[in-house]
Amino acid sequence: MESRTGAPAAKPAAPASAAGAGASTIEFSAVSKRYPAPVGNGSVSSRAAVESFSAVLPAGSITVLLGSSGCGKTTLLRMVNRMVEPTDGRILLDGEDVQDGNPVALRRSIGYVMQNAGLLPHRRVLDNITLVPRLNGTARSQARARARELMDMLGLAADLADRYPGQLSGGQAQRVGVARALAADPGVLLMDEPFGAVDPLVRRDLQRELLRIQGELAKTIIFVTHDVDEALMLGDEIILLREGAQIAQRGTGAQLLADPADDFVARFLGLDDAGRTLRLADVAGSRVVLDRAGRALGRIDADTEARP
Ligand SMILES: Nc1ncnc2c1ncn2[C@@H]1O[C@H](COP(=O)(O)OP(=O)(O)OP(=O)(O)O)[C@@H](O)[C@H]1O
């Protein structure tokens, strides 16, 4: 690794050559966002949620933005599809500045999954999934056929297609949310704590499904979480953030665990607490990440990539 902060790790887990068709490289270049902040005397000042964030995210990889509540993860994510406009800096998709195009077209070209799925409550599952392709002009029959394929890929039974979102479990709704985000075949998928509201077992299933799907589709995914285990499970790379979206450390999960940059990183990963969480062990000749109960979360291969 060239640097523990802004620079990419020396060996990205998913090289661009492995990227799915249309997966984009995402480049943040000195991006800042200041929100207005009222001050006592009735006037308004501003406060930096994101302060000069720079990073290049390789096409076809999962980058996890990991950090505590309020450190700027959602703001960073939403600047990619211009739900939030940056105050300074540029975001480039395959070298094209996102500011140069139409924001509505941009939003339709990027998949977005949020914590509570964000489905339209008065539209059936199939219509939720086909919404963006239809808006983009895809023929109804073609959009519906693709939606059924995606439902199948995400383990959703075909008879759920005619239900309304209120008739789904939390896990099913999240799967529909992922199917909807993939329906227009975006090059980029933004996922904002998408599995945060479901129970731990369903969450595990959803994480595994996402990895399986990513194995087929190889999108460029930015995945926001504050959950260390989730970050280690999913991230080809993890960017651990402090307040103001300052990069505390960037690298594979294995790199962060084996060589935390400072006390903040070690504490965030739980490495300072013998009673908690994760440790590395040698098992049958492999380096393995173990949780508190000694369960293997993932193996670290020779190239230091952590994978379940
Ligand atoms: N629309 C807004 N107006 C003013 N301040 C905002 C706005 N949105 C976010 N902020 C502030 O910007 C900072 C970063 O917020 P952001 O939602 O990006 O953090 P986060 O890391 O995603 O947090 P969480 O994990 O709780 O969702 C916080 O201090 C938040 O209060």
Image: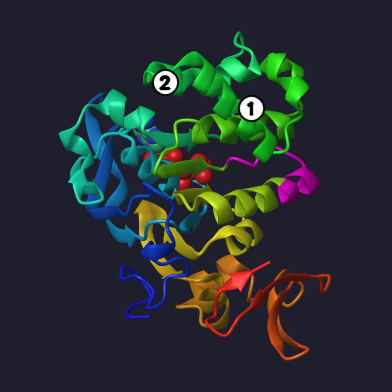
Quadrant in which ligand 1 is drawn: top left
Q: Residue at x 69, y 35 (%)?
A: 152
Percent position of residue 272, x then y:
63, 76
Circle 2/circle 1 CB separation < 8 Å: no
Vertical comparison of 191 with 256: above or below = above
Can you see residue 39?
Answer: no
Can residue 198 be found in the magenta stretch?
yes
Q: Residue at x 31, y 68 (%)?
A: 6
Is 17 left or right of 102, judged from the image as shown? Answer: right
Indicate which disc residue 271 carries: none
Is 159 left or right of 175, judged from the image as shown? Answer: right
Q: Quadrant of residue 283?
A: bottom right
- Residue type of the residue flagged with mark 2: Thr
Q: Residue at x 45, y 78 (%)?
A: 261
Indicate which disc residue 138 carries: 2
Front position in the image: 85 or 272: 85
Vertical comparison of 221 with 57: above or below = above
What secondary structure is marked by label 1?
A: helix
Q: Report crowding for label 2: few under 14, some 14 to 19, many 20 or more residues within 10 A (C-alpha).
A: some
The residue indicated by pointer 1 is 148
Percent position of residue 275, x then y:
77, 73
